[in-house]
Amino acid sequence: MKKMLVANWKLNPENVDLAVALAKLEDKKQVIICPPTPYLSAVGNVIKRAKLGAQDAFWEKEGPYTGNTSPTHIKSVGAKYVILGHSERRNILQEGDDAINQKVEASLKSGLQVILCIGEDLDSHQRGEKQTKLFITDQIIRGFKNIKWKDLRNIAIAYEPVWAISTSGSGLKDAPEESIKIIQFIKDFLRERYMLKKPVVLYGGSINSKNAENYLINDLIDGVLIGGASLDAKEFNKIIKICLER
Ligand code: PGA
């Protein structure tokens, strides 16, 4: 399987012109560009090789839900993917597993491919591997609740240890062999519990052009979700090059 490179721009860049310029520079195969919602159309209009993704979607299609964006809105402007359950939404906006589960269900129903973020917090990490595994399996079980098996195949898991994300403030760095061990565990879990033959699991957490190879070299990792480094086209293109060489 070709590796996925998900560019999670978060709340950047500052305006639509900068977003369009950045998208043109990152418009490569295997790349999924996830700009802020207001830029989806403009970015979608200029990319030819990359795919378009959103950073979140609400669970209702339409109705009295001020400020939200539905999976059908996202789809209607050309997005094929949606990131759900990102740790910044879980932590800053107190988004819980039930809400995330509803978003997963609604997004899949609308035909979007879901990138479901999971990952242990610093406390669980410090309590050791057993607690880390409990934490992430719990997130998967809750996120997958009531989703039909045929739809589960349209979910890619992004394993992002929260403490390893560049903006987490922990100052800690993940070791590739540690995350690869957890990714193996996640894949085994998805195969055994959900009968998924080919579970797709990405890694995210301070990926840059210097460490990308350590992750992308491993066949277990189906791609990477990149925050900070995706805002720098030069840096991001170095990562694309590493990916294409694999
Ligand atoms: P980072 O962000 O690459 O800046 O660590 C990853 C993420 O939060 O998705």
Image (spheres, helix red, strand yellow):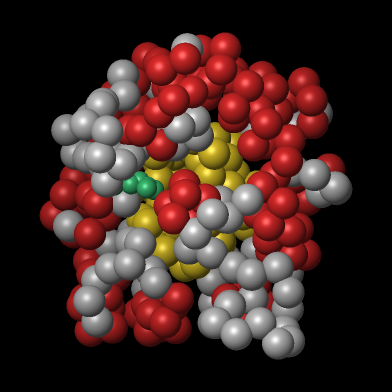
Q: Is residue 179 above or below residue 115?
A: above
Which residue occupies the foreground of this view, 17 or 93? 93
Left or right? Give the position of 149 relative to 60.
Answer: right
* Quarter of the figure with residue 187: top right
- Give the image location of residue 98, x and y in percent: 72, 51
Which residue occupies the foreground of this view, 173 or 75? 173
Q: Is residue 198 above or below residue 90?
A: above
Q: Residue at x 73, y 87 (%)?
A: 63
Which residue occupies the foreground of this view, 141 or 153? 141
Q: Is residue 124 above or below residue 157?
A: above
- Give the image location of residue 92, x and y in percent: 44, 55
Q: Residue at x 42, y 64 (%)?
A: 34
Whether residue 198 is visible: no
Q: Residue at x 22, y 59 (%)?
A: 231
* Quarter of the figure with residue 162: top left
- Give the image location of residue 99, x and y in percent: 68, 57
Whether residue 57 is visible: yes
If the image is split into quadrants, where does the C terminus sit?
Answer: top left
Q: How many marks?
A: 0
**Furthest residue toward left:** 234
Left or right? Give the position of 72 relative to 79.
Answer: right
* Quarter of the figure with residue 100: bottom right
Q: Residue at x 55, y 82 (%)?
A: 67
Left or right? Give the position of 53 relative to 192.
Answer: left
Q: Is residue 224 above or below residue 132?
A: below
- Give the image location of residue 232, x and y in percent: 17, 57
